[in-house]
Image (tube, rainbow, N blue to C red):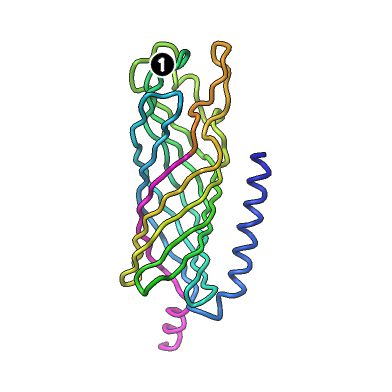
Amino acid sequence: MEKLIVRNLILFLFLNVTVSCCWAEDYNPTEIGLKIGFNISNLYTTDSSTSDIGMGINAGGFIKMPISRVLAIQPELCLTVKGSTVRFNSADLDGTARFELTYLELPVLLVLKSTEHLNFQVGPYLSYLMNANIRNVSNIHLFDYEQNLNLYKFRRFDTGLIIGAALVVHSVTVSVRYSYGFIKVGKEQIISGNSYTIPNTNNGVLSVHMSIPIYSKEFSRNINQKY
């Protein structure tokens, strides 16, 4: 099921980018730029008593391709760090662990221009887990998270949905987004004869970032006309 979701999403992303490239020339210039920001995420699960928010960075690049005067397709590629500190209190899991999960993420967003300075964004994402950093925080009695969890105990692919809004001032865009993953973060494990998924939850992330275009065809044409 997970492989089918990922395969269909890859096909959807490819078709969107292909169609966008064909239509982009008729409207505003295509932009290429960079983005950087931070994430606020949480991994609260039914196996935990508390889950503190985790902070991480997100950084990468984007291509904004207009398909009309008010609509654009914006594929992005970025590194994004998700996770949080979770206190477990089930029969076989005891203690507190910090999860820091680094993904390579590909969102493809539909950007709706509301005014000259405001737009709204929605679209799917596909991400690949590149690194999992787990640390014991306290109270390790029954289960040692550092020793028993590694990169291969987590699902490597995640897909989900992003919604957000952005403010544009002098070509600088400040965005606020929320993303929710459709796939559980952890894989199922057998501990003391019982089945557990650690962590038994989906990625939920609030992100804030700033993006700046570094190239547009309009800018390039103006330079060429000058010289």
Q: Is 54 or 31 nearer to us in this picture?
A: 54
Give the quarter of the image for residue 46.
top left
Q: Is residue 198 left or right of residue 172?
A: right
Residue placed at 48% from the left, 45% from the top? 180
Residue placed at 41% from the left, 32% from the top? 44
Q: Per the image, is 63 magenta?
A: no
Q: Is residue 89 left or right of residue 22?
A: left
Give the quarter of the image for residue 213.
bottom left
Residue placed at 44% from the left, 42% from the top? 204
Q: Residues within 10 Å of mark 1 (few under 14, many from 20)?
A: many
Q: Which residue is mark 1?
A: 94
Residue 56 on image: x %, y %: 37, 42
Q: Is 91 or 219 nearer to us in this picture?
A: 91
Tally of numbered discs: 1
Q: Is residue 53 above or below residue 221?
A: above
Q: Is residue 18 left or right of residue 169?
A: right
**Quarter of the image with the N terminus in it:** top right
Residue 214 on image: x %, y %: 41, 68
Q: Per the image, is 214 magenta?
A: yes
**Quarter of the image with the C terminus in it:** bottom left
Residue 19 on image: x %, y %: 63, 68
Q: Amino acid at mark 1?
A: Asp
Q: Is residue 203 above or below residue 66?
A: above
Q: Residues in magenta? A: 203-227
